[in-house]
Amino acid sequence: MLIQPEIDPVAIHLGPLAVHWYGITYLVAFGLFYLLATRGRLRHEPFASVTQPAPWRRSDIEDLLFWCVIGVIVGGRLGYCLFYKPGYYAAHPLEIFYITKGGMSFHGGMLGPIAAAALWAHRRGRPWLQVTDLSAPCVPLGLAAGRIGNFINGELWGRVADPSLPWAMVFRGAGDAPRHPSQIYQFLLEGVLLFVLLGLYARRPRRTGQVSGAFLFGYGVLRFTAEFFREPDDFLGLLALNMSMGQWLCVPMIVAGAALWVWASRAPAAGP
């Protein structure tokens, strides 16, 4: 049985400013997206041959990333407030802006960048699914970085595990019972494994929308699986069919991903 390492959530103190590890993992996530997009996706087909309305350039990724950063923050916060504590925030609307007190939702943090990418694509005259196809394989490693931040913070721990499990861990704030290190499970599943699978899939020419559909479906399935080991939110518990809120939010993602992939498979092949 392991004990969670004692890691100060604050990485650096700069006078009155405290830089948290969780914030650093967000910066790492955005940096990984930029590197993977500019040094990988832009050099591969079909994006390397796109000419209309204009060729893809590094500056496009920088601009798109800025929009998506705003989408992550706004969407993640609003998603948490709407999906997990709608009654509380309806009664305390000003606390929606108290981001430093915690409370971000991945599913909201995904919808935010999707909406931001749609607006960006519209302003640039680019097909929206072309933008999401370029972006999707660059996302999983950023998700992996965020799970490391959860682990350092000692939050989102797993369900009680058999003490004989070699990697069962006691988390500070979660009592003395050994638990699944679900943050690490999610790091490996939604982060590393999804990155590898999606990267392999996206290396070959695909029809517009198929890579985006594969991402939605793949993340939904892997997150749904990881939720079996993650402790449900204490203010929600397990919902209908003994499924957590995270699992229920994955269901429409899985359905949408499969539907998008099927629809895209019947569309013309991606091209310049």
Image (cartoon, rainbow, N blue to C red):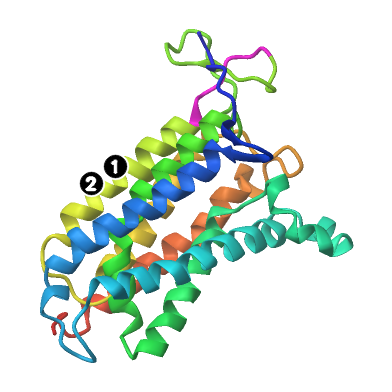
Q: Nearer the viewer, residue 248 or 84?
A: 84
49 vs 22, left or right, is left
Question: Does the stretch in magenta take in 180?
Answer: yes
The percent position of residue 129, horizontal first and vertical second, equals: 32, 78
The percent position of residue 140, horizontal first and vertical second, equals: 35, 50
Q: Which residue is pictured at 64% across the width and 14% down the height?
A: 177
Question: Does the stretch in magenta take in 62?
Answer: no
Near mark 2 (Cα within 10 A), the count class, few <14, some 14-19 or many ≥20, is some
Label 2 residue SS: helix
Near mark 1 (Cα within 10 A), the count class, few <14, some 14-19 or many ≥20, is some
Label 1 residue SS: helix
Q: Nearer the viewer, residue 242 or 65?
A: 65
Measure the C-alpha gap from mark 2 to mark 1.
5 Å
The kind of residue on which mark 1 rests is Leu
Q: Residue placed farthest to the front in the image? A: 15
The percent position of residue 270, horizontal first and vertical second, equals: 16, 80
Q: Is residue 86 above or below residue 267?
A: above
Q: Which residue is pictured at 36% across the width and 55% down the height?
A: 139
The percent position of residue 237, horizontal first and vertical second, equals: 71, 40
Callouts 2 and 1 close, C-beta under 8 Å: yes
For the record, the magenta segment spans: 176-182
- Residue 193 tag number: 1
Provide the residue designation for mark 2.
Answer: 196
84 vs 31, left or right, is right
The kind of residue on which mark 2 rests is Val
Q: Which residue is pictured at 60% across the width and 20% down the height?
A: 171
